Image: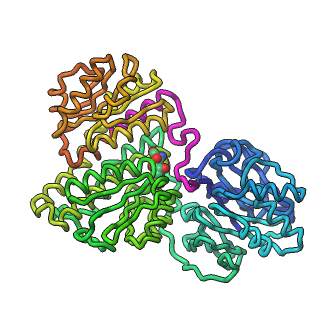
């Protein structure tokens, strides 16, 4: 989950590398570093913490080399300090790495026996020493790198540079993404095309097992056996944006506020509001012939999938198996001929989701991916991509990507229902019309910010929070708890409201805020019973509902947040917003780093 960059340039590259790393900081921000070759020697600057610390370091002690590699880290092996920051050096070799070398302990022992001394606790350093040992044995740099690559097990994207050669970077990929950028007399390597967007939009994506010899005027790509391979060069649509926060304090706040617009864009991609029907889709499967969909994803994207399950099953009568991708990938689920698989991912790079996708591909199942980054690996390896039109999501906490994922899933569920004949044309039009209203309802929810901020001031005083919901509000309860934990560091649990009495009710006392997500729907009365159980034990209830729900709850709440009267079908999209705002304002109140919370990264490319 680190970000890596390499540039073989014409002018000093350190500032360009830092610029590219800024676009990759979403992948990790525990430490950062740059190395260049200057007058034949390897030089580096590294700093613990965010990129801004490295920038300060470089201002004080600039690097002048015209070839360099850079890294922004999310720690896996070894604490986030300067010693463990990349680039790592061994003799004549400098290296940056994203991923995990699974056999590093065995390799390290072997290298130690040969007298190699390790400076860091990272798995990466073994790769540098392996190459250095090859060089000592007389191998040329490309041969040395190739020999070392063959010894590695695990997931890696690497950029390798050599003392005394200011026209060579070797890139290698096995798992995490790596893109080669082609310039005029300059070449680039980057974890994604967006990192390279200010320099070039001519991109070649390496495939697993590929390694590339990158020089100013030439790039050669080889497979793991050393055979030259051709990989297609493509025009990247990645823009050289460095999006700013506008008038907002945080990206998360900005992204929450963008939702009415991006939900609307996303829905318009799938729905024809004039005819009131879903748009035609070119699919690798026939919804009418499927007997099941397997959905797999991680974190918030998984919770979007969980809501999708309710929709596919309810409207299209299509059974859905939903799994957390890290479980799915090892569970060897049998997938029949009438199955399709759907993967949900904002980044399109999440390692576990990608591994699950590859499992399904190996089983011969048609694959669809709901992704926000259209050029991502998951998008490229799917048979069909369902884009979310959320725009770049910078805040680590997923907000607008989540509601756009819901918008896509809802649209697909309607399409599936229409194709399977489980709804008639009138019902299709009714559901499409309801979806078209989601952006307007979302705008109305944003007007409740002041009240939500007031509730957040109370939440910021507690150590534990419980979220409850039924039906599609149950995954939202899980999402509320995830969001709160993630950015405020307050412990939170989400539960299906009906499950309360099977254990978690023991937690309830007057210190436990219980956030109940309960639109006035078919099962509202059932949720009211669960609220009664909480109230009877002194729990402080914060009820998120609508006018009818507020009127009929009949319970004294600590606070009731009244949302617009929303059709049941689209309620999860609309009710996601107060849940996000509650977490956001609580985190602001706690003074945490909202956009880059501790220990996290936006894109999780390790398992
Ligand atoms: O990029 P992805 O959507 O695949 O990421 C999946 C999760 O890592 C992500 O949703 C995570 O749970 C969010 N940070 C939660 O806000």
User: Image check: 361 left or right of 446?
Assistant: right
User: Image check: 449 left or right of 206?
Assistant: left
37 lies above or below 454? below
Residue displayed at 67% across by 83% down: 227
Q: How many marks?
A: 0
User: Image check: 341 left or right of 281?
Assistant: right
424 lies above or below 284? above
Q: Quadrant of the C terminus?
A: bottom right
Residue displayed at 48% across by 59% down: 329
Residue displayed at 18% across by 45% down: 567
Name the residue nearer the viewer: 339 or 231.
339
Q: Position of residue 437 (x, y in %)?
A: 21, 50
Residue displayed at 34% across by 48% down: 259
Residue 595 part of the magenta segment: yes
Q: Position of residue 202 (x, y in %)?
A: 56, 74
Q: Position of residue 33 (x, y in %)?
A: 72, 51
Name the residue nearer the viewer: 207 or 269.
207
Q: Position of residue 177 (x, y in %)?
A: 57, 64
169 lies above or below 120? below
Residue 326 part of the magenta segment: no
Within the image, what quadrant is residue 205 found in? Answer: bottom right
State which region is magenta. 578-607
Decide if residue 478 is in sight here. yes
Name the residue nearer the viewer: 347 or 45.
347
Decide if residue 245 is in sight here. no
In the rendered view, how is the structure colored? rainbow
466 lies above or below 362? above
Name the residue nearer the viewer: 534 or 53.
534
Within the image, what quadrant is residue 149 found in? Answer: bottom right
């Amino acid at each position: 989950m680190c970000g890596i960059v390499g540039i073989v340039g014409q002018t000093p590259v350190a500032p360009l590398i830092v610029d590219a790393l800024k676009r990759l900081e979403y992948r990790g921000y525990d430490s950062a570093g740059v190395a260049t070759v200057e007058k034949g020697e390897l030089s580096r600057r590294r700093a613990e913490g965010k990129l801004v610390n490295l920038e300060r370091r470089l201002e004080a002690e600039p690097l002048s080399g015209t070839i360099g590699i850079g890294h922004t880290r999310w720690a896996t092996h070894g604490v986030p300090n300067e010693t463990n920051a990349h680039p790592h050096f061994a003799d004549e070799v400098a290296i940056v790495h994203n991923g995990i070398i699974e056999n590093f302990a065995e390799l390290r022992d072997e290298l130690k026996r040969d007298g190699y001394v390790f400076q860091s606790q990272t798995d990466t350093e073994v790769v540098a020493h392996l190459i250095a040992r090859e060089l000592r044995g007389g191998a040329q740099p490309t041969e040395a790198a190739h020999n070392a690559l063959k010894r590695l097990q695990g997931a890696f994207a690497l950029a390798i540079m050599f003392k005394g050669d200011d026209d060579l970077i070797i890139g290698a990929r096995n798992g995490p993404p790596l893109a080669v950028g082609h310039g005029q007399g300059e070449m680039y390597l980057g974890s994604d095309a967006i990192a390279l967007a200010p320099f070039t939009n001519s991109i070649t994506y390496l495939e697993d097992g590929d390694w590339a010899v990158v020089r100013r005027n030439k790039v050669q790509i080889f497979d793991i056996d050393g055979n030259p391979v051709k990989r297609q060069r493509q025009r990247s649509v990645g823009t050289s944006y460095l999006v700013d926060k506008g008038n907002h304090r945080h990206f998360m706040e900005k992204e929450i506020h963008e939702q009415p617009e991006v939900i609307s864009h996303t829905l318009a991609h799938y729905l024809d509001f004039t005819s009131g029907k879903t748009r035609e889709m070119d699919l690798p499967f026939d919804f009418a012939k499927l007997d099941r969909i397997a959905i797999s994803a991680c974190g918030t994207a998984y919770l979007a999938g969980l809501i999708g399950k309710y929709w596919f099953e309810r409207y299209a009568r299509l059974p859905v198996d939903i799994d957390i991708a890290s479980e799915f990938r090892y569970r060897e689920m049998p997938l029949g001929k009438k199955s399709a698989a759907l993967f949900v991912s904002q980044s399109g790079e999440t390692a576990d989701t990608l591994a699950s996708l590859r499992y399904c591909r190996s089983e011969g199942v048609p694959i669809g991916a709901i992704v926000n980054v259209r050029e991502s690996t998951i998008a490229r390896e799917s048979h069909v991509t369902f884009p979310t039109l959320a725009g770049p999501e910078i805040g680590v906490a997923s907000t607008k990507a989540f509601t756009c994922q819901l918008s896509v899933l809802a649209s697909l569920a309607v399409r599936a229902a229409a194709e399977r004949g489980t709804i008639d044309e009138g019902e299709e039009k009714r559901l499409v019309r309801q979806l078209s209203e989601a952006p307007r309802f979302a705008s109305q929810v944003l007007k409740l910010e002041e009240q939500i901020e007031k509730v957040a001031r109370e939440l910021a005083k507690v150590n534990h929070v419980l979220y409850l919901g039924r039906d599609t509000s149950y995954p939202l309860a899980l999402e509320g708890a995830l969001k709160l934990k993630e950015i405020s560091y307050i412990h939170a649990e989400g539960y299906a409201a009906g499950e309360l009495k099977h254990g978690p009710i023991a937690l309830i006392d007057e210190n436990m805020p219980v956030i109940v997500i309960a639109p006035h729907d078919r099962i509202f009365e059932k949720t009211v019973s669960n609220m009664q159980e909480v109230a009877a034990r002194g729990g402080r209830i914060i009820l998120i509902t609508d006018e009818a729900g507020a009127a009929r709850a009949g319970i004294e709440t600590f606070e009731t947040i009244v949302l617009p009267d929303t059709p049941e079908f689209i309620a999860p999209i609309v009710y996601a917003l107060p849940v996000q705002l509650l977490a956001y304002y609580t985190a602001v109140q706690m003074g945490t780093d909202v956009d880059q919370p501790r220990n996290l990264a936006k894109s999780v490319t390790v398992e």
